[in-house]
């Protein structure tokens, strides 16, 4: 995981995070949480937006580019690869994070089995 050859790309993605990614990271990065998410984490040939290693959960925030049929096919292959590694992938749209952050956080906590 977290291949050295992806280091610059991961750094670039963190530096150019979307508003939704930044907003969700403020919650996921809180030190008082019982879990430690990583952002822009490499898994095999892919980089996921957020990853919780001890629970094997990846969170993806999708913008409008993911509406493209070619991008959806890529996302499907990517998700199948991650699932083959035992990783659960949950997806939210930028709008979910922007307009329904409380619901997004509740769903993440539920999936992470946090009360």
Image (cartoon, rainbow, N blue to C red):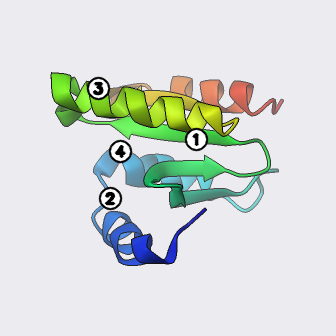
How far is mark 2 from mark 3, CA to CA?
23 Å
How far is mark 1 from mark 2, CA to CA?
16 Å
In the image shown, does 29 or 76 lie closer to the viewer? Answer: 76
The image's mark for residue 17 is: 2
Q: Are marks 3 and 4 in contact (CB under 8 Å)?
A: no
**Residue 107 visible to the viewer:** yes
Q: Is residue 48 left or right of residue 61?
A: right
Q: Secondary structure at mark 1?
A: strand
Query: In the picture, which quadrant includes the C terminus?
Result: top right
- Label 2 vs label 4, nearer the camera: 2
Q: Secondary structure at mark 2?
A: loop
- Label 4 vs label 1, nearer the camera: 1
How far is mark 2 from mark 4, CA to CA?
8 Å
How far is mark 4 from mark 1, CA to CA?
16 Å
Name the N-terminal-most of marks 3 and 4.
4
Q: Secondary structure at mark 3?
A: helix
- Label 1 vs label 3, nearer the camera: 3
Residue 35 lies, with reference to residue 69, above or below; the image says below
Residue depicted at x 56% and y 38%? 82
Residue picked out by circle 4: 20
Q: Are marks 4 and 1 in contact (CB under 8 Å)?
A: no
Name the N-terminal-most of marks 1 and 3.
1
Give the image quarter of residue 95: top left
Q: Are marks 1 and 3 in contact (CB under 8 Å)?
A: no
Name the N-terminal-most of marks 1 and 2.
2
Q: Secondary structure at mark 4?
A: helix
Residue picked out by circle 3: 73
Query: In the picture, which quadrant includes the N terminus?
Result: bottom right
Residue picked out by circle 1: 58
């Amino acid at each position: 995981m977290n291949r050295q050859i992806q280091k610059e790309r991961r750094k670039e993605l963190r530096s150019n995070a979307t508003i939704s990614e930044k907003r969700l990271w403020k919650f996921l990065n809180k030190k008082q949480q019982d879990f430690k998410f990583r952002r822009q984490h490499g898994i095999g040939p892919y980089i996921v937006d957020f990853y919780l290693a001890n629970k094997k959960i990846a969170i993806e925030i999708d913008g409008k580019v993911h509406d493209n049929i070619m991008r959806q096919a890529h996302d499907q292959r990517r998700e199948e690869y991650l699932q083959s590694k035992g990783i659960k992938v949950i997806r939210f749209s930028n709008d979910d994070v922007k307009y329904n952050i409380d619901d997004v956080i509740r769903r993440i906590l539920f999936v992470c089995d946090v009360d």
